[in-house]
Each structure stands twice: as C-alpha cells, then as structure tokens.
Image (cartoon, rainbow, N blue to C red):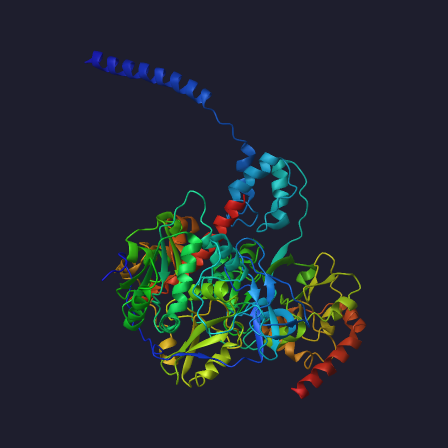
Amino acid sequence: MNEVIIYAVSSLGVLAIVAAVILYFVAQKFKVFEDPRIDDVEEVLPSANCGGCGYAGCRAFAEAIVKEGTLEGFNCPVGGSDIMVDVGKVMGMEADMAEPQIAVVRCSGSVVNSPAKVKYDGISNCAAAATVFSGEGGCSFGCLGLGDCEVSCDFDAIHINPETMLPEVTANCVACNACVVACPKDIIELRNVGKKERRIYVACVNEEKGAPAKKNCDVACIGCAKCFKVCPFDAIEMKNNRAYIDFEKCKLCRKCEPVCPTNAIHEINFPLRKLKPEGEKPAAKKAAPAKAAVAEKAAPAPKAEKEVKKVEEPVAKKDSETKENEEKA
Amino acid sequence: MKTFKLGGVHPPENKLSAQAAIEYLPLPKQVIVPIGQHLGAPATPVVKKGDEVKVGQLLAKASGFISANIHSPVSGKVFKIDSVYDSSGYRKPSIIINVDGDDWLENIDKSKDIVKDIKLSNKEIVDKINEMGVVGLGGATFPSFVKLMVPEGKKVEYLVINGVECEPYLTSDHRLMLERGEEMMIGISILMKGLNVEKALIGVENNKPDAIEELKKLAKNFKGVEIHPLKVQYPQGGEKQLIQAITGREVPSGKLPLEVGCVVNNVGTALAVYEAIQKNKPLIERVVTVTGKSVKKPSNFMVRIGTPVKELIEAAEGLPEDTGKIINGGPMMGKALLNTDVPVVKGTSGILIMPDKESKRGDTSNCIRCAKCVQVCPMGLEPVYLSKTSKLQMFDKVEAERVMDCIECGSCSYTCPANIPLLDFIRFGKNKVGGIIRNRNKK
C-alpha cells in the first residue's frame, strides 16, 4: 500500500521537475519584455477607449507614450491636462499643458433661419444624404440635421435639438473629435474652451457669395468683412467669402459680434450686454435660445461690465439697425 | 424569348409617351451649360464672359483622358461663367449663354439629308468622336471614344447596341429607333468600323414591337447588324445584363465588357455618332421624355443641352397640381430634382413627374429574411447584408461582399416587402468603399 503512494508521489514529482525545467528554458527563450510603465500609464488613463487621442484606445495610447518616451504631441482629450500631468508623473517628466477644447457647431441654419424648400424622404444618415442632395434649406454647406454627430458621440455630449434641428453640444464634451470626423459638411470644429468657458466664433461655414448665402439662410456669414475690419488682434481671417475667428489669437474682446449684420457671430457664456438687455439682438435670441439661456446663467463679472461700456456705441447702432430691418421686413 | 439569367423585376411599364412623336422645342432665352456633364474630369472653359458664340462652337475643352469636349448648343453671348445649382443642390461651374438667334458654325450640315458613305478611317472616327464631345447617352455619360480605343491584346467580337430602355415611363430611345432608325443604323456602322468588328447586335425589349419591326426592315440593308428581341425585364439595360441576355456571356466581377469581347453603346449614342461623323455636328441636343401619370401631355422633346427643365415641363402643358416629386431620369434609378431651374445635360433621358400619393415612401418595418432582394439582384449580391453592413459602417465587410459590383438598379428596394431603403444604404456604402479603394490605390 505504501509503495503505491511512494511511486505515485515520486513519479509525479519527477514529472513536475522535468516540466519545470523545460518551462523555465522555454520562458527564457520566448520572453517578451513589456515595459511596466505601460500598465501604469494605462491605469491613469480614463479607459474611455474613444480614440480621441488618435490611437486605437487607451492601451495603444499608453504604449505609444512609453515607446516614444516623451509627452510632446500626446494629449488625452477626455482627461485633459490633469490626466496628462498624472501620466507625466508616471513617466517622470513634465506634461505640456494642452488647452482644453470643446466641439463647436458652426451652423445656425435652424428650421426658422433657413426654412425647408424641399422635403427629404431618404435615410436618416447625414453622410448618405450629403451625397444625394445639398440640404432642405437650400444651403449646401449647412447642417442636414440627421444626427450623424449624435450617433458618433460616446459621451452623450451632442444632441439634435428637435426644435431647431441643429446639434447642441453639452458640457459632457471631451473634444474626442468623433463628431468632427462624422460630420460630412465639416461644420463641427474643436475650439479652445476659453477663459471662463467664453467663446466667440462664426457660426456659419457657407462659402457662397453674400446674396445667395443670405437668400437661403437669414444668419449666414455673407463675407462682408466688417468683423475683420473691427478686430484689433488680427484674429479674423476672410477666406472663401466667409470669416473665421482664430481661437488662438482671439482675445474675446467682443468687438466683432455687434457689427455682424446677420448675427452669424456667436458669443457663448458672456454676461449680457448692459444696454437694453431685453430688446437687444432679438434675431440672435431667436436663433439660439439655448445659447441665451446659458448666457443668462453666467453671473455678470465686474470686469465684463467695463468691457461692455467700451463697446456701448456699436451696440446702440446695431440695435437701431436691427429695428429698422425689422420694420422693413 | 431571351433575357438575362439572374434576378430582375418587372415593374409596371407605364410608357405613356410611346406614341408621342419627337417634337423640337423652341430655343430657350438662356442656356446653362455645366462643364462637368460626363463621367470623368470636368472640361476647361475656353470662352470668357462677353464672347459671341455660334452653335457648335467649342465652349470647354476636355481635360484629361477621361473627359469630353463641350460645345455651345446655341448662338449668342456668354453671359457669365459661374457656379450654378445642379440637380442635387450643389454648385457646379457652368457657362451661361444668352441666346440670340440660331447661328450655326458653317461646317455643320444642318440639312435632313442622310449621308451614307463612311469616308473616314477608323483612327479618324475615334478622333472625331472625341472632338465632337460624344458621350454615352444611356445615362452614365462615359466618353464614347474611350470605348472605341481597344487596348492591345483584347479582341472585340460584338458591338452590342442598347435599345432596351428598361426603365419604366421613359420612351426617348424608343422614339429615336422609330423616327431616326436609318441614321442610327449608319451610326452603328460607323461604330463597327471604328471598332473593327463584323457584328453588331441590337437588343430591344419586346414591348416595342413597332421599333423591332422598323429596325428589322432597316437591318436588311446593313451588313452584320442583327436585331434581338428580348423579354421585358428590368434592369436589362445594364450593360452586363444586356450582354448576358444577347450573347449568353457573363462579364466577370470588376471587369469591363471587353473581357468577353463586347462593347456596349446606346442607340442614342449611335445617332450622336452619326451626326458627329457625317454631319460634323457636336453633341448639342438630345431627346428627353417628359412624362407622368397626371401630366397633361406626356411628350418626347428634342432639346438643346442647357435648356432649363422648367421649359420642358411648360411645353408638356405645365406642372400638374398633385405633383409630389420631379425626377430626373426614370422611376427606378432617377434622382429627385430640388428645383426646375436646372438644365438638361448630356445624361438627362427623362423628366418624370410623380403624383403626390405615389411619390411617398411607405412605412418601413423589420426585415423578415424573405430573401426577395437576394432573388432579384441581377448581380448576384446580397442586398440585405450589404445594406446592413453599410448602415453599421463596416466598410471592410461591405467591400468583401462585392459592393462595387452593385449597379444601383434599385430592384432590391423595389421588391422589399418591408419597404427597407436597401439601395440608399448600399449606395452610401458603395460611395465610401469607392473612396477607400481610391485612397488605397493612391498609396
């Protein structure tokens, strides 16, 4: 009886030793070295796997950082600079602080501003619709409102407003670039979030000349270059019959917004201008009620009041102009 | 009776304008001539604002190998060269001419006399067809001279002539065969000479018995021309389907008809070739069917390229009150127009005005896996799978399932009992895959 136990234990023991020796040499032979920092970096990353950084996922991003051994040119849009600082700690280096960004929809061709001339009856897919027709309102540059951006968003940050049929970006946006890629009309752009989340941008990408652009949409940029002339910082460039505000150069002085004859320039999160806050810019309010709501929420800072005083004159002028226009209409 | 083997549908024919003889429309006041009317690179304008042009004068020169010359369809003054909305609402560069009189270039033979002798050699024929801006008038507007330039090592046995007109409603080719049969036959002989082939096979569906009879009568005088009556089946007008219906040969996936020794041309192209070679007349006019169930006078018009579509509708006694959609082309493959200011171009074969109640899409329900779309697909594809993968943007799978073979005939969408817009998704997928392939080839 004892013999059987001894045989069994010893033969299995010998087998185990032989296998261990083989496995040891195999493991030596096929050893793959993986930098432990990859795991550490991945741990820090948000694990959203959105691809916003340009890599296939957080793991691939971590591998790329460790492989390159630098943080230059790497940015996790979801985590922002906080995460990049943490990654820097793991890697033992300084992270360059990338300005946080947000997606901005550069079209205001809502159902009110650009009423439908034809009815689209096809599939609900912007990319497919863009290949067969220009858009219900007639503007071939404007938003189709079929929601490819909404589908592409992993963060529940962009939604089509059923009233205006335009996408609206919420605070959830992490600037992962997915909607920018999804939009067949190149309307969505990533812009710096800006100081106190204040932004000024031209909400139009129409490249037609003024008259046809305005014919299809009340709030189209007509390329009049008034904002270009008024900008003290050379932040506005005129190209293809439209204005573009460079967010790197823009100092948020608010001089361009009141001179725009079509209200194509939008400002977000600024306090209301002091002068006649109610009667001011009725068209703009109609165009973007959500934007106005956001603006109302923001508490007026004393510094901003100073700014308002500076631009009082053009505001008054603008106000009378809009009224005149309204009377004409 | 012969037809193609795989798939196909038979929608109601509705050839309302079959008995309406071709009418010449009065000249419009202004024509809009887009510089990209053909498949391939847009032409480069050679006139400028303010130039006086005559009928037949070169307006824009072909740029690149696959491109076509564009000639002035009218005489008058170039009003401007500007971008104008095309049928899908995007702006395309066009030459706009204010019409003044009808002054033709002197070397164009305007008479109705039929010139039978073919004097040019085959090389000259190809060059002349190129020079006169002749493109395939069946719908794809592929420059015709390219088809005549057979690469070395390939042998063409048959010239296949497409007189099928399988799209419901359209009758422009039908009327051409009836009224201009003899000129067309000479055009076919010219094409045969250009290609160096002995045999031309004309396919005509048997819903046009008068045209078949007329052509058979004419064919006695032309050596090597055969008429093949075919069973009515959509999409027999697709070149691959037509070759199979007439010769029984199957064009391999992704290959041209040349692979099986065939070159396909439309009857309208044959007439344009006749006019280009024998009459020196560039491609400046074409037959357009204006039809629809509530149109008062369904007609076939011979119109100059660049005539606004609204003038054609006016000539057919106006837009009916219950209009739901105006379609450029036939009901199966045509595209809805956004407005009627757009011009007739080389590829416009018909304007179909659909009543409101017929133009709406039905409610979509779920796929019940009935496989009807698979059954009717003339290319042997699986539309249900293609549309699903396109919808999910899985373009590698779409490509692997041979989306590039799809001829966009719409049989799948037509037959689907659940009203699923299969073709819309497939077109989207095909578009994307086409872009992916082009990018890959660039690298």
Question: Residue at image x 49%, y 74%?
Answer: B111
Vertical placement of residue B195 versus B47, above or below: above
Spot occupied by residue B385 in the image (x, y as percentages of width and height): 34, 55
Q: Residue furthest bottom?
A: A327
Question: Residue at image x 50%, y 48%?
Answer: A49
Apparent side of residue B254 relative to residue A62 in the rendered image (left or right): left
Spot occupied by residue B292 in the image (x, y as percentages of width and height): 38, 79
Q: Nearer the viewer, residue B36 or B104?
A: B104
Question: Residue at image x 37%, y 65%?
Answer: B421
Apparent side of residue B142 relative to residue A300 in the rendered image (left or right): left
The reply to whether residue B380 is in sight is yes
Question: Residue at image x 78%, y 68%?
Answer: A229
Q: Find residue B362 and report its image quarter.
A: bottom left
Q: Nearer the viewer, residue B22 or B421?
A: B22
Apparent side of residue B150 relative to residue A237 in the rendered image (left or right): left
The reply to whether residue A57 is in sight is no
Q: Nearer the viewer, residue B112 or B2?
A: B112
Q: Nearer the viewer, residue A323 or A184?
A: A184
Total numbered labels placed on residues in the image: 0
Vertical placement of residue B429 versus B348, above or below: above
Q: Residue furthest top?
A: A3
Spot occupied by residue A146 in the image (x, y as percentages of width and height): 48, 66
Q: Quadrant of the N terminus of chain B?
A: bottom left
Spot occupied by residue A329 in the image (x, y as percentages of width and height): 64, 86
Q: Quadrant of the C terminus of chain B?
A: top right
Q: Find residue A290 and report its image quarter.
A: bottom right
Vertical placement of residue A174 versus B321, above or below: above
